[in-house]
Each structure stands twice: as C-alpha cells, then as structure tokens.
Amino acid sequence: MPEWADADPTAPLPAPEGQRFRGFRTEFGRVASGAAGASLSSALGKYAREASGGSSIGPRRFGPAYNAGASFAGAMADVKAGGTGQLAAGVDLRTLAGQPLDYAAQEIARALAPENADADQIAIAIQEAVAEVLPEATTFDPDAISMDQVIQILVEFFSRIIFQEITSVAGDAWNHSPSATRTTAVEADLLEIVRVTVDKHLSPRLANGLSTLSRQEIAALQRNAITEVWRDWESRE
C-alpha cells in the first residue's frame, strides 16, 4: 500500500501474503464466465478477507478518498450556513452557481482531487457521483442541493471508488468473460452490490447532521463505515 494512500501511514503493515489474490480472482473469474454456482457475494468475501488484507487493512487504502469526501461534505455544509465552501473544498461553490452541472462537477472534482496517483480516480468518482444523484439538474445550484443529497453523493462516490479498486484487483480474471455484454452485466451487478453495502453502513452514520461535524469527524465516520463494509463482506462465503 503506498504511504500516500494509507489512512494510517504511521501504523505498521503486515507482510502481504504472496497468493492473497488467488482465491478472489478465481471466484471472480467464475462469475465473469457465468459458471454455475459462482457468486459475486462469495467473490467479495474472498476480496475482503484475503485480497485486501481484511477489515483492519483494506479500508486503510482509501485515505485520499476519506479526505476528499470530508472536504466535499464540509463545503456543502458551509454553503448551507451561508458560506462559499472555499475553505473546505478549495473552490468557491457560489461562483459555480448557474454553470452547467457537468462543468461545476468537473471544477469541484479538480479542487478535491489529491496531488498523488489517486487524483484521476477520485476526480472521476466525484463527477460520476454528482451526475448519478442529480440527474434532473442541468445547471449547478449549491443552495438547492439538500444535505440528504450530499449524503447520497458521498455514498455514490465511495461506491465507485471501491468498485474501481475491486475491478482493478480482479486483473486478468476479467478475461474469463465470454463477451462485452457479459462484462457490462457483471460490472453493473458488482457496482450495485457495492452501492447497497456502502449505503447500509455510511448513510446512517451521516444522517444525524453533517453541518455539526468537523472535517476530521466526517473523515473518521467515513472510515468507520467502510470498515463495517469490509466486515460485512468478510462474513460472506
């Protein structure tokens, strides 16, 4: 795990198991091929327990995402309080009011993206999350975005970040898919499972009010929720 990606960079990491990806990739390859009895639930169990190092290690990988999510939530809470979001997100959200939604999302993503190798991944996930949660909007209006929608955006953001990580770790297992149609179907099913699990554990933790939480508190709540996601998956056989 790169130090810049680690949410606990000063905590020691155990030596990685040499064959830690094998079980996950084998099961994921069976899912991709459409083999009888194969399941994404079982594949996620192997991913959480083995490939990622378990719930004490796997969620540490998303340090930059926790920071980006907390900054976005803090910026939106600041707007609701009459501010601009500049201090939290590095961009004045009110100057983006009236701009096309995709342009505003791009600018927000650019401001929140870290200066490391996760930059593109986080920027893309932010833009996709905004588009998914606000499909009816054509222009950006920060005052019209409810805090419930902010939570939905965070759920979608983390779902896509984790989805990207899982599909990347799957590696050559994707080659077992017999067609582009099958690959697309597996991707859609995987994203939905990830989304449901993230929503289950993240939404309740944020529902008591983002406006009263500091950026550090939001980041910690996100980290705790993703740890619970891992524990949920670890129990799947």
Image (spheres, rainbow, N blue to C red):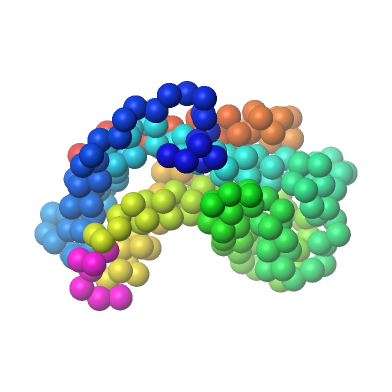
Picture quarter containing residue 231?
top left
Magenta-drawn segment: 174-181
Magenta residues: mostly which secondary structure? helix
Residue shown at 41% from the left, 43% from the top: 197
Quadrant where the C terminus is found in the figure: top left
Q: In the rendered view, tell whether residue 133 sits above or below residue 1.
A: below
Q: Nearer the viewer, residue 145 or 186?
A: 186
Residue shown at 27% from the left, 71% from the top: 182
The x and y percentages for residue 13 are 39, 28
Please say whether residue 224 is visible from this viewpoint: yes
* Left or right of 150, for residue 91: right
Residue shown at 56% from the left, 58% from the top: 120
* Left or right of 29, for residue 8: right
Labels in figure, total: 0
The x and y percentages for residue 184 are 34, 69
Task: Report the residue that reaches farthest toward the top.
Answer: 11
The x and y percentages for residue 38 are 17, 54
Confirm whether the magenta stretch covers residue 80: no
Picture quarter containing residue 52?
top left
Please say whether residue 196 is visible from this viewpoint: no
Residue shown at 24% from the left, 67% from the top: 175
* Left or right of 160, for residue 183: left
Q: In the rendered view, tell whether residue 55 sits above or below residue 185.
A: above
Q: Nearer the viewer, residue 14 or 156?
A: 14
Picture quarter containing residue 88?
top right
The x and y percentages for residue 37 are 13, 54
Confirm whether the magenta stretch covers residue 180: yes
Q: In the rendered view, tell whether residue 122 sits above or below residue 18.
A: below
* Left or right of 212, for residue 150: left
Quadrant where the N terminus is found in the figure: top left
Q: In the rendered view, tell whether residue 171 sits above or below residue 46.
A: below
